[in-house]
Image: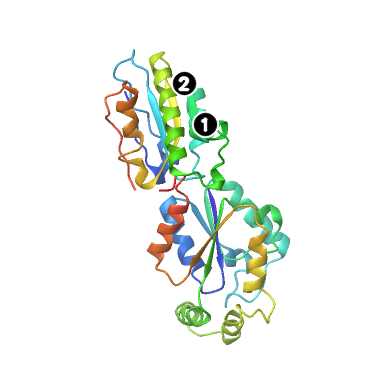
Amino acid sequence: LLSLRPSPLNLIHSADEEPEIRQNPVMPRLLGMCGLSFSGKTTLAKALASAVDAEYIGLDDINEERGLRGGDGIPGEEWEKTSSIAVQRVGLMLSAGRDVVLDDTWALSRCAPSGPRSVAPVVGQTDNQGCECEF
Amino acid sequence: MRILVTGASGSGTSTLGRALATVIQAAFVDADDLFWLPTDPPFKLKRDGTERAALLRERLGSNRSLVLSGSIDGWGTDLEDAFNLIVFLRAPAEVRVDRLRTRELRQLGRVDEEFIAWAAQYDVGAMPGRSLARHLAWLESRTCRVLRLSGTDSVDALRSAVLQALDPRPA
């Protein structure tokens, strides 16, 4: 079950809210981060992953593995490649029954429709519900 | 997240700073409120440099997200490089002077001509304090990204431009 309630401009607040209760305890969870640069996505994502014993998958880490630096302005096609690597890894982890915290970099218009919601059908583990973005 | 909105007096740093702080739910601090001691009438007595730096350090420490408007050139490099993004606003002197006169009348009931004269010569830099040349040199030595915008644009447009710059995956 993908259960996201990302609110890019209220990210800190999302930490105070109870996460959506998983409806099927057997099915692994995918939690996705969403928010502006410097809003604390990575800090919260790592804390979440550690707290709920989930795998942390970060787009910045994948960019770094690929020798891409965010500060230099990463071209769209490179982002697409990084995203597809992330989606693959998410799929693998969910298939293995592991919960995942996906530290992606959606913000503003990218939160929907090509943001977290788009990952849901791709990884084939979710019902594509529950992603609500507020601006 | 820490954002500094800087520029000449009247370029709109406080207006944009407040708008940004509201939308990203951050604390807002105007450097003038740290630079000047609270007197009546205001803007007469400067706060000690060490004290104003300590005040800003304290505000940065106690707020996870903070938007600061104004100029902090010379306040200490730990403070000057404490930001994730610097927004630099520029506006023509005549626009700034008009705004400042309106603000002075509204806030103080009179216009401090000495202040207006000081603010008007910012682009030339004939007097001590803030000037374009000093600001540009200061921006050059910063470590974070600097976003340069026109202070004559609407607050809505400026706010959108800053949010766009903070979009981690640009279009």
The kind of secondary structure element at disc 1 is helix
State the image coordinates of residue B107 (x, y, percent, origin top left): 48, 77
The type of residue carrying mark 2 is Ala
The quarter of the displayed image where residue B121 is located: bottom right
Mark 2 chain: A
* Residue A33 vertical position relative to residue A126 in the rendered view, above or below: below
The kind of secondary structure element at disc 2 is loop
Q: Nearer the viewer, residue B26 or B168?
A: B168
State the image coordinates of residue B23 (x, y, percent, origin top left): 41, 53
Residue at label 1?
A62
**Does A23 sit left or right of B62 as displayed?**
left
* Residue B57 vertical position relative to residue A96 in the rendered view, above or below: below
Residue at label 2?
A54
The label number, if any, that marks residue B80 in the structure image: none
Query: How many numbered marks, from 0 up?
Result: 2
State the image coordinates of residue B89 (x, y, percent, origin top left): 52, 67
Q: Is residue A68 visible?
A: yes
Q: Is residue B130 visible?
A: no
Which color mode does the image show? rainbow
Q: Residue at the spot x=39%, y=68% of the render?
A: B154
The type of residue carrying mark 1 is Ile
State the image coordinates of residue B48 (x, y, percent, origin top left): 71, 65
